[in-house]
Image (spheres, helix red, strand yellow):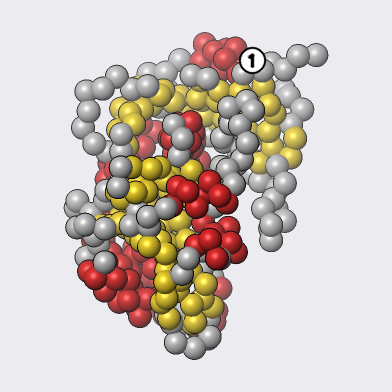
Amino acid sequence: MSAPSAQEMAQEILRQTPTEVSLRLRLNNLSFEIKTNRPELAQELEGYFRPFMQASDEEPPITVYALETPAWDCGLVLRQKEPEPGKSKIKEEYADLADGRLVRKRLTGMVFIFGGEMNLAVGPCLENPNQVINFINNRQIQWELEQGALLAHAAGVCGPRLGLAMAGQAGQGKSTLALHLMSRGVTFVSNDRLMVTRGQDGPIMTGVAKLPRINPGTALNNPDLKKVMSPKDQERFAALPEDQLWALEHKYDVDIDACFGMGRIKMGFGLDLLVLLDWERDAGPCRLAQVELADRPDLLASFMKEPGLFYLPPKGQAAPSQEDYLKMLAGAKVLVLSGGVDFERAADLLAEELQRS
């Protein structure tokens, strides 16, 4: 039995649930049209993406449909997506279609169908707007990778002349360090994902329109970020021991405009400095040293990122190698932060590096 068609499945859903509202976004150099059946969903998406948006009269090459419905039964036998290393919970299941893929979020019942020119999110979107936002961002990642970019697990900021990317294993503090640097005057590029391409003068990084998410300890230790927490939460979390505060899973979205002022986001910039985080708690003074990236394949691996279920590679395309990443990053100065975790000192060292380089 042949696999069903993403196009046909999506068209049938659209026939039953016509769209009423459309919204246009331009993120970096890519335009989207978002079509939905619920005005309040369009309003929420516009509010979230507003800090990243740019004006454009360009006809959008990508259309994303976001349909508010009850959890939808696709009627297919789905395969489980194995959890990432170190995690045990299965969050997604999927089916490869004749012309695309269907992904279902097990906890929320949200279903995503994509392939070719079809990009559709269907289910309880209003209860799960972050999943719709992530789907839109993944369509940007798909487009960028199809143009030859490589995906990085990194945060990015930029100064007046230079761009800085920060990479490390999950939980090592990329976003926290980026926000500490923003308190020293730099501009936000991206929180957790970067696409890297080659320009005439070296590598270029492109960000994803995703606001940083921080834990209570990060908010309490940066005056610019305290406003993400209510006074009640500030008091409650400030009373916790440091070890307990460090281990909390509670998260807050950081509104860059509200915390740092308007105009502090730029989604594309040169990648002049790459900082790899190789530190750990209580390991002595924080140190910054230059390295040759080819000599540290262990750290390069923390920069490399697999696109995951929401990326459909062209047929026959091999996964990029470490050599591909080394070639893409040629020309960037590479530094390693080692020793103990110290965001204030690290931000001071990197701010000086941005001025000196």
Q: Nearer the viewer, residue 352 or 10?
A: 352
**In the image, residue 161 lies at what x, y percent?**
21, 57
Q: Residue at x 45, y 74 (%)?
A: 337
Task: Give the camera-side residue of 320 and 95.
Answer: 320
Q: Please state the horizontal and vertical placement of residue 213, each as a whole percent of the image.
A: 43, 58
335 relative to 323 in the view: left or right: left
Answer with left or right where residue 161 lies relative to residue 268: left
Q: In the displayed orientation, state which residue is furthest to the right.
A: 1
Q: Nearer the viewer, residue 71 or 331?
A: 331
Q: Position of residue 309 (x, y in %)?
A: 61, 38
Picture coordinates of residue 59, whole percent (x, y): 29, 19
Q: Is residue 126 left or right of residue 46?
A: right
Please tell me which residue is depicted at 66% across the width and 18% down the height of the picture.
Answer: 98
Q: Quadrant of residue 191?
A: bottom left
Disc 1 packing (10 Å; few <14; some 14–19; many ≥20) = some
In this rendering, the answer to whether 249 lies above or below 127 is below
Q: Amino acid at mark 1?
A: Ser
Visible residue check, residue 73: no
| Residue 271 visible in the displayed image | yes
Among the 4 quarters of the image, the one containing residue 65: top left
Q: Which residue bears the numbered disc 1? A: 5
Which residue is at a point 45% across and 39% down the rendered structure image?
A: 149
Q: Is residue 213 left or right of residue 282?
A: left
- State which quarter of the image contains the N terminus: top right
What secondary structure is marked by label 1? loop
